């Protein structure tokens, strides 16, 4: 069985294809044979060591496939089920694996394996951000939110889901073509943050009022300006660091800018239990099944070309979702 392994943290060249044994599932586990694997920016953090892992490690946190065997105590899945997951621990860059069953969900018949592999981690993230990471005064129809990297994997899902919720999502992206894509997928306004001052544009779009929420996954390059976009009591929802981690900040700055709130969210707190995972997945399956959110897969790479897949993701060359094919 082929798996992508890293023996030490570093660049894409650290990822090599190796042969590994796959055992039998223990209590609470399943063995799944993958049909497709999702690529996510968190895989880069694992590869570089920004999020350290015990080594050697197989990285990857998202995939779809067919359940081959279930361990003792697993009742929501059986051998032969079509399934997909976003999950801890990392290890999805492989043909088959044994893993905890808790966050693995049965895939509805209407959703194909490629879509299942592309949408679980990114779609569940858009779900908890827009539905559960809310300002004190809750988001209401017509409210503006700012979402950085709006043409990316999580971004294009968020654009569509925000539109379905009646929100006006202002999306930032790194080129005119990416901005056009985010607009096509539901952003009410788009800003090329490599060319335009997004604080000034947000003020203009909101008539000077600012925003209740900024969803910021870019981190270092956007942090300070994102805070400038918020209205008093607004919420800075940080959920990633694709440009690097934001610099440490003094809490007093939040008071001076209008008693702001800051949170750093991670999907893995939200999918800590089988029940919460399934409830969020059902919401995702519904919105995808309804056609209100389409999962756009713009890049496909064979598993053996994973190094190139990482180069393209880190090089800002991708849009929408990316999968590794088997
Ligand atoms: N906390 C969580 O629960 C959670 C879950 C999923 C994802 N995330 C985070 O959400 C973000 C999006 O994830 P994704 O997998 O969907 O990736 P993605 O958005 O498809 O790719 C990352 C994008 O970030 C933008 N970016 C801005 N500055 C960058 C830089 N210096 N280097 C590289 N990219 C840069 C690029 O878009 P532009 O060229 O348009 O700027 C790039 O395409 C990532 O930061 C990820 O860590 C967090």
Image (cartoon, rainbow, N blue to C red):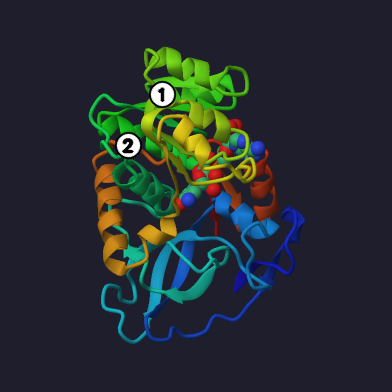
Q: Quadrant of the C terminus?
A: bottom right
In this picture, is 133 found above or below 172? below
Q: Quadrant of residue 52?
A: bottom right
Q: Quadrant of residue 156?
A: top left
Residue at figure coordinates x 60%, y 42% from the top left: 246
Secondary structure of residue under mark 1: helix
In this picture, is 185 found above or below 197? below
In this picture, is 2 found above or below 155? below
Q: Quadrant of residue 81?
A: bottom left
Query: Nearest the camera: 141 or 258?
Result: 258
Whether residue 181 is visible, yes or no, is: yes
Of the numbered discs 1 and 2, the one sitting upstream in the chain is 2
Query: Nearest the camera: 62 or 196?
Result: 196
Q: Quadrant of the N terminus?
A: bottom right
* Image side of residue 170 versus residue 274, left or right: right
Residue holding disc 2: 161
The residue carrying pointer 1 sits among few (fewer than 14), some (14 to 19) or many (20 or more) residues within 10 Å by Cα, namely some
Looking at the picture, how far across and down is residue 192, in whole percent?
Answer: 56, 21
Looking at the picture, how far across and down is residue 9, in whole percent?
Answer: 72, 62
Q: Which mark is residue 47?
A: none
The residue carrying pointer 2 sits among few (fewer than 14), some (14 to 19) or many (20 or more) residues within 10 Å by Cα, namely many
Looking at the picture, how far across and down is residue 203, in whole percent?
Answer: 44, 16
Residue at figure coordinates x 41%, y 30% from the top left: 258
Residue at figure coordinates x 33%, y 51% from the top left: 111
* Image side of residue 200 versus residue 243, left or right: left
Looking at the picture, how far across and down is residue 322, in whole percent?
Answer: 53, 46
Q: Which mark is residue 184?
A: 1
Query: Nearest the camera: 119 or 252?
Result: 252
């Amino acid at each position: 069985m082929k798996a992508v392994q890293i023996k030490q943290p570093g660049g894409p060249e650290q990822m090599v294809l190796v042969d590994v044994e796959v055992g039998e599932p223990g209590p609470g586990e399943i063995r799944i044979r993958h049909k497709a694997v999702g690529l996510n920016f968190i895989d880069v953090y694992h590869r570089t060591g920004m999020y350290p892992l015990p080594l050697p490690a197989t990285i990857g946190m998202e995939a779809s496939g067919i359940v081959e065997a279930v361990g003792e105590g697993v009742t929501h899945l059986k051998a032969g089920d079509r399934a997909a997951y976003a999950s801890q621990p990392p290890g999805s860059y492989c043909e088959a694996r044994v893993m905890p069953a808790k966050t693995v969900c049965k895939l509805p018949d209407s959703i194909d394996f490629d879509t299942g592999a592309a949408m679980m981690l990114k779609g569940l993230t858009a779900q908890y951000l827009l539905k559960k990471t809310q300002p004190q005064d809750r988001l209401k129809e017509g409210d503006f939110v700012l979402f950085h990297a709006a043409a990316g994997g999580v971004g294009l899902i968020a654009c569509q889901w925000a539109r379905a919720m009646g929100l006006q999502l202002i999306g930032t992206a790194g080129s005119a073509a990416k901005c056009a894509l985010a607009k096509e997928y539901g952003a009410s306004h788009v800003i090329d943050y490599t060319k335009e001052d997004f604080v000034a544009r947000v003020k203009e779009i909101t008539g000077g009022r600012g925003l209740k929420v900024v969803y910021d996954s870019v981190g270092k390059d956007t942090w300070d300006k994102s805070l400038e976009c918020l209205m008093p009591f607004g919420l800075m929802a940080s959920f990633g660091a694709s440009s690097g981690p934001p610099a440490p900040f003094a809490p007093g700055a939040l008071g001076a800018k209008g008693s702001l709130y800051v949170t750093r969210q991670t999907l893995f707190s939200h999918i800590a239990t089988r029940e919460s995972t399934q409830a969020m997945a059902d919401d995702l399956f519904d919105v995808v099944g309804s056609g209100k959110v389409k999962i756009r897969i713009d890049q496909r790479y064979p598993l053996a070309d994973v190094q190139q897949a990482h180069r393209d993701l880190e090089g800002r060359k991708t849009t929408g979702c990316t999968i590794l094919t088997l």
